[in-house]
Amino acid sequence: MIDRRKEEHIILALLEESQYGSSWLDEVYLIHNALPELDLSDIDLTARFLGVRVSAPLGIGAITGGTELAGRINAALARAAEELGIPIYVGSQRIALLKPEIRWTFEVVRQNAPTVPKVANLGAPQLAKLPEEELAEWASQAVEMIDAHAIAIHLNAVQEVIQPEGEPGLKGVLEKITAVRRAVGRPVIVKEVGCGISKEAAARLSAAADAIDVGGFGGTSFAAIEGARAQITGAWLHKRIAETFRQWGIPTAASICEVKSVYSGFIIASGGIRSGLDGVKALALGAHFFTMSYPLLRAAVEGRIKEEVEAIMMEVKVAMFLLGARKVEDLARAPRVYGPRLKGWIEQRDLKC
Ligand SMILES: Cc1cc2nc3c(=O)[nH]c(=O)nc-3n(C[C@H](O)[C@H](O)[C@H](O)COP(=O)(O)O)c2cc1C
């Protein structure tokens, strides 16, 4: 059952209808610098990911694991991550904790990407239900399975409400996140999966999370994906809720500003980042790093993952050149103008961005 769901997520995520809304990164206009006083070859793309030096400020987002197809996708993504020197997340590992025979679909990431930072993944709704000893065991096993540098805990309230087999119970999650951090002794990333993180939520995560991955609105929509699944199974109420809440969420650009205004830890941008230029805009807004999921899943399925990541890296480099930013950190100072929607959001929410 859970493996069929994983397979459906991959297939449905590739449909055009599963990309929904705008990340508002098109509301960020970075100002061209005609006099950058740099050569393209001077640009230093290297960045730090939770204390580890990597070759670019971008990583492969959490996608999959748990089935034959997922295992092949993970192996291809991991090979590209290792070759290009960038971090890689895996999808939720709960399935492998319940069914040890499919652990290999995650272990391929450790085998194919031995040196780059790897990020384990568990879901908050499942953690919320576990007693502390079991939680510690799950988290340690998830980390060990892929020799993870960090563990991501995903918050996915919308998805849990919409999917017929969902578990929409998030009471006590903050405490459980703290328990995971104690158990694994590695950085904990708290991430959304397409609805973004507000400044109120980020402030509450301050003591519990080493990093926040905003997972903003405007890219892959789990409301759309779960709505399509509900349509297939005839679960009309879930389909209706999916349609109503398809536009729910904080656009990625706004969510970065929300989190940056109150949170002093490591900020990762994701959700609807579709080019290296989008990524650079996210870094200019205040993120330290960015990840992409859908574009890299598509590239993996089409057998051109390395080319895609190389193209994104080149786009980041070109954008830095055109802004006169020699180092990734310089992007935080890039002159910019915000469009009216983002400007209004920043003002009304009293954000520093
Ligand atoms: C097929 C698919 C499966 C996903 N599974 C997970 C998951 O298991 N855990 C998780 O934290 N995020 C998962 N995500 C969400 C992504 O990590 C990311 O937050 C989201 O797709 C937004 O990024 P994007 O617009 O670049 O795709 C998944 C995304 C896709 C496309």
Image (cartoon, grey):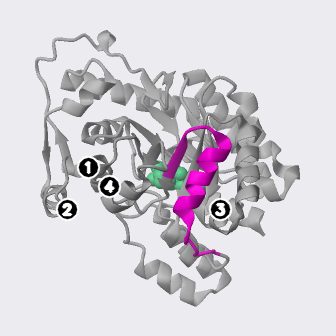
Kindly indicate whether the residue at mark 3 contacts the one at mark 2 (C-beta within 8 angstroms).
no
Q: Is residue 150 visible?
A: yes
Label 3 environment density (alpha carbons within 10 Å; few <14, some 14–19, many ≥20): many
Q: Sequence-wise, which precedes: disc 2 or disc 4?
A: 4
Residue designated by label 1: 261
Q: From what the image shows, is residue 225 above or below residue 70?
A: below
Q: Cβ of disc 1 within 8 Å of ligand 1?
A: no
Q: Sequence-wise, which precedes: disc 1 or disc 2?
A: 1
Q: From what the image shows, is residue 271 above or below residue 80?
A: below
Q: CA distance from mark 1 to mark 2?
A: 10 Å
Nearest to the eye among marks 4 and 3: give it.
3
Where residue 284 sits: x, y (%)?
A: 26, 37
Residue designated by label 3: 127
Q: Sequence-wise, which precedes: disc 4 or disc 3?
A: 3
Where residue 99 sits: x, y (%)?
A: 84, 57
Kindly indicate whether the residue at mark 2 contacts the one at mark 1 (C-beta within 8 angstroms).
yes
Q: For the magenta stretch, what is the residue range?
A: 166-190
Tag 3: amino acid: Leu
